[in-house]
Image (tube, rainbow, N blue to C red):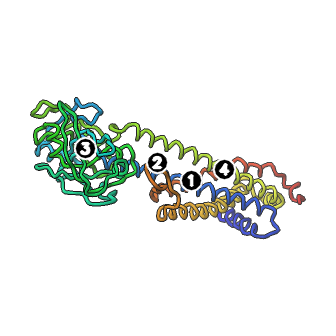
């Protein structure tokens, strides 16, 4: 093995000489590997980053798991369930659960002197985790929401503020239709922007007391309970533990509890995100194919150029397997150098995009205003290992050309 490595290294170093015919082929092979790996790193990083961004925004509006009334439909005019202290405590103690919070919703209309807009008033209590909205707050502040009195303060999205020409401190009149038309005057205390148009064009955030009064519910009744978990990968397992406790149970008002994950609540969004994985696999296969074929062409040129050397080695007693190993080791040197440059270029592009946001996107279409970057070291390590193995395996077939070289004829080959 040491002998094969030594000869392979000598061949590799000798290709630095300008006299070598194979030098352009070697450069093209390494360039193919470098470009292919760089494209794969960037593609995987973008898709992972995009999925994380969209997923976090969907979860920010609805948490990981929701418990609601089994009889509720998919509209925001919901039927209530009782969120008692004992139930909230029991849910908080479930393995994997990090936070439990209540919410209520009421669809309505915002009316100004010049325009009107449909919306959903989402009421939250003092225990509600508002870190998501604070992270996307553009102006103003997040007020303290109450479950015992009406604050009449709300946070609206920039999309709604722009459509209705609203600013901080403006008074807005909202109308809600049930058995009769009810009105509430609210004050804009904050403006947020998530670039997730499905929600930005719809939700305004207020206190749960106001929403429950509009719905004519009892104080402990709510539209649902949102549950945050510590590990997204354990979503289904945690939901199973929660459903075992609440599904099918009835509260004191006769409503039946029913739990759903955020994936079940938004199947179209998560199905779309899953389709992105197919795009990544197509890119990976194409790039590995391109890199592999450039390496095959480079190896064939090297073998043909070294026909005389192969004949000498066979005359000295080297068998076909030994010589094939020499050229495969030589190919690993080339692949390794190409992968080194591919990693440098790929991670450099990701670094620049992640910190300087060079490439912009239309948030109305893509839900983000810049191309996001994500991933972890294990994914990139696996990508490098698989690229190396596939490239080497693709070279096994062409290396059989060595077995066809006759020592007596090849020694005279020039």
Q: Gap between marks 3 and 1, in whole Å?
A: 43 Å
In the picture, measured across the screen, residue 96 lies left or right of residue 218, that is right
- The numbered mark at residue 40 is 1
Q: Mark 4 points at which residue?
A: 290
Total marks drawn?
4
Residue hosting label 2? 366
Give the structural element (helix, strand or loop) at label 2: helix
Residue 213 falls in which quadrant of the image? top left
Instruction: Report whether 82 appears left or right of 324.
Output: left
> Which quadrant of the rendered structure holds the N terminus?
bottom right
> In whole angstroms, how far apart are the C-alphas of marks 1 and 2?
21 Å
Q: Are marks 3 and 1 in contact (CB under 8 Å)?
A: no
Residue depth check, mark 4 versus mark 3: number of the one nearer the observer: 3
Q: From this viewpoint, is residue 103 visible?
A: yes
Q: Any mark on residue 121, and which?
A: 3
**How many residues crowd mark 4 within 10 Å: few (<14), some (14–19), many (20+)?**
some
In terms of sequence position, does the residue under pointer 4 or pointer 3 come before the other?
A: 3
Say whether disc 2 or disc 3 marks the residue closer to the N-terminus: 3
The residue that appears at 48% across and 40% down in the rendered structure is 275
Could you give the CA–CA distance between mark 4 and mark 2, rounded to whole angstroms? 29 Å
Badge 2 crowding class, 10 Å Cα cut-off, few under 14, some 14 to 19, many 20 or more, is some
Secondary structure at badge 4 equals: helix
Q: In this view, does 218 lie to the left or right of 33?
A: left
């Amino acid at each position: 093995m040491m002998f094969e490595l030594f000869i392979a290294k000598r061949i590799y170093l000798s290709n630095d000489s300008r006299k070598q015919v194979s030098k352009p082929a070697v450069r093209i092979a390494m360039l193919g590997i470098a470009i292919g790996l760089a494209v794969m790193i960037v593609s995987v990083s973008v898709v992972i980053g995009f999925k994380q961004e969209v997923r976090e925004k969907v979860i920010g509006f609805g948490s990981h798991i929701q418990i609601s009334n089994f009889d509720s439909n998919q509209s925001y005019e919901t039927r209530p369930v009782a969120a008692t202290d004992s139930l909230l405590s029991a849910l908080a103690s479930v393995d994997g659960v990090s936070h439990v919070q209540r919410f209520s919703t009421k669809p309505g209309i915002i009316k100004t002197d010049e325009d009107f807009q449909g919306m959903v008033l989402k009421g939250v209590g003092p225990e509600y985790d508002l870190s998501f909205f604070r992270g996307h707050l553009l102006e103003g502040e997040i007020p303290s929401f109450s479950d015992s009195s009406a604050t009449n303060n709300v946070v609206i999205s920039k999309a709604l503020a722009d459509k209705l020409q609203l600013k901080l401190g403006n008074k807005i009149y909202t109308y809600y239709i049930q058995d009769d038309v009810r009105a509430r005057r609210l004050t804009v205390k904050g403006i947020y922007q998530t670039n997730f148009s499905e929600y930005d064009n719809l939700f305004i955030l207020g206190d749960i007391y106001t929403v429950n009064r509009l719905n004519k519910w009892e104080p402990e009744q709510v539209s649902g309970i949102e549950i945050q978990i510590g590990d997204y990968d354990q979503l289904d397992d945690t939901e199973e533990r929660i459903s075992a406790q609440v599904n099918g149970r009835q509260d004191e008002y006769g409503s039946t509890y029913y739990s759903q994950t955020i994936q079940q609540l938004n199947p179209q969004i998560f199905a779309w995100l899953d389709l992105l994985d197919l795009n990544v696999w197509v890119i990976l296969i194409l790039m590995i194919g391109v890199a592999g074929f450039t390496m095959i062409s480079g190896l064939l040129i090297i073998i043909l150029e070294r026909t005389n050397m192969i004949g000498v080695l066979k005359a000295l007693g080297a068998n076909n397997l030994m010589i094939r190993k020499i050229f495969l080791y030589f190919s690993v040197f080339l692949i390794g150098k190409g992968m080194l440059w591919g990693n440098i270029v790929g991670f450099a592009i990701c670094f620049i995009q992640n910190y300087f946001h060079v490439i912009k996107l239309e948030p109305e279409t893509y839900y983000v205003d810049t191309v996001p970057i994500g991933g972890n070291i294990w994914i990139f390590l696996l990508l490098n290992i698989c690229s190396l193995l596939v490239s080497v395996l693709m070279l096994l077939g062409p290396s059989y050309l060595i077995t066809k070289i006759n020592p007596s004829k090849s020694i005279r080959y020039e």
